[in-house]
Structure formats: structure tokens, C-alpha cells
């Protein structure tokens, strides 16, 4: 696999809710999105299997989102990996979060922007390797961003770095 090649894509319909403070399903036009509140940190999870062609060079996670109503301000995101191959599924065991901060929302409501978060191979991504089942946790860090209203997550793409 070459650097920049897509490994896996998650759409908003493939999410799993957090047990509390979760992003919620909403509809924008005829499109499904996940809404993340502006005043509370909310999270969702995506489950997948790292493709066997992953070359262990690290990954970049791309978050495509818009805003329900805001046309100014910024959104902050936290992302973390959990190696589900070795994790006792009765508890969570995510690696430390990597963040992307101060991504300016589009100036027109209904448009989207993409933010990206880079992970190095190994402990940074909870040692997820080729063929490993994993979970990805995505959280809006509402405590430190400035966009009013919901952030609408459209999709998550993981590419080889």
C-alpha cells in the first residue's frame, strides 16, 4: 500500500453510540449526519478491521464535517484507536487521543470541510496492525472550540501515511 492510499471509510450510518454523551443521528437534506453538541463533549465509535495491505507506516484520519447553523468559529476533534484484537471488550482501552484543533467551519451553512489527524504506527494507534479488528473513537472537544450549534460529522476516512 502506498502513502496516501485509502485504507477504510466509515459513513455516519456506521457509528456506534457512546453509553453517555454520544453524537446523535440527524438528517441534513436527504443525508444522514452525526450531530455533536457545542456545549458538551460527545463521542461516537466506529468498528473495523485494519486492511491486510496496511504497511505499518502510520495513518491519517480525515473527518469531513459541517455545521448545523454556524458560519463562523472553529471545531476541535479528538480521535483515538483501540486494538480490539487484544482488548477485553467488557471495558474500553483506547490509546491517548490525537487532536485537530481550530478547524474553521465553512462560511456557508450546508457546506463541508475536512480536518485530519495523524497517527504514527505503534502505541500512538494502540498497536493496531494489518488484519487487526479495531475501534475508533471520535469526540467533539466542545470545551475548547468556538463554533455555535451542532457540528455535523459526515464521514471518516483512514489513509496510510
Image (cartoon, rainbow, N blue to C red):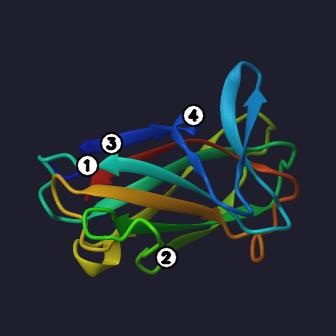
Nearer-N-terminus badge (2/4):
4
Nearer-N-terminus badge (4/3):
3
Mark 2 → mark 1, Cα distance in angstroms: 22 Å
In which quadrant of the rendered view does residue 88 lie? bottom left
Compared across the picture, whether 108 is left or right of 33 comes to right
For label 1, count other residues whose C-alpha is less than 10 Å away and answer few (under 14), some (14-19) or many (20+).
Answer: few
Label 4: state its secondary structure.
Answer: helix
Q: Residue 13's mark?
A: 4
Mark 2 → mark 3, Cα distance in angstroms: 19 Å
Q: Residue 8's mark?
A: 3
Nearer-N-terminus badge (2/1):
1
Q: Position of residue 127 (x, y in %)?
A: 24, 72
Mark 4 → mark 3, Cα distance in angstroms: 14 Å
Viewer-nearest of discs 2 and 1: 2
Nearer-N-terminus badge (2/3):
3
Residue contact between numbered discs 4 and 3, judged by CB atoms under 8 Å: no
Residue appearing at x 82%, y 42% in the figure: 68
For disc 2, the marked residue is 97
Mark 3 → mark 1, Cα distance in angstroms: 12 Å
Amino acid at each position: 500500500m502506498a502513502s496516501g492510499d485509502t485504507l477504510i471509510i466509515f459513513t455516519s450510518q456506521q457509528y456506534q453510540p457512546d453509553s453517555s454523551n454520544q453524537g446523535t443521528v440527524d438528517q441534513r437534506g436527504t443525508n444522514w449526519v452525526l450531530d455533536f453538541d457545542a456545549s458538551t463533549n460527545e463521542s461516537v465509535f466506529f468498528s473495523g478491521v485494519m486492511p491486510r495491505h496496511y504497511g505499518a507506516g502510520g495513518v491519517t484520519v480525515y473527518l469531513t464535517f459541517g455545521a448545523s447553523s454556524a458560519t463562523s468559529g472553529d471545531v476541535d476533534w479528538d480521535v483515538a484507536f483501540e486494538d480490539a484484537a487484544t482488548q477485553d471488550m467488557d471495558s474500553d482501552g483506547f490509546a491517548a487521543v490525537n487532536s485537530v484543533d481550530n478547524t474553521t467551519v465553512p462560511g456557508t451553512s450546508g457546506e463541508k470541510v475536512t480536518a485530519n489527524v495523524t497517527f504514527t504506527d505503534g502505541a500512538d494507534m494502540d498497536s493496531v496492525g494489518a488484519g487487526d479488528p479495531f475501534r475508533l473513537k471520535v469526540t467533539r472537544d466542545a470545551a475548547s472550540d468556538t463554533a455555535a450549534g451542532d457540528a455535523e460529522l459526515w464521514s471518516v476516512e483512514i489513509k496510510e501515511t
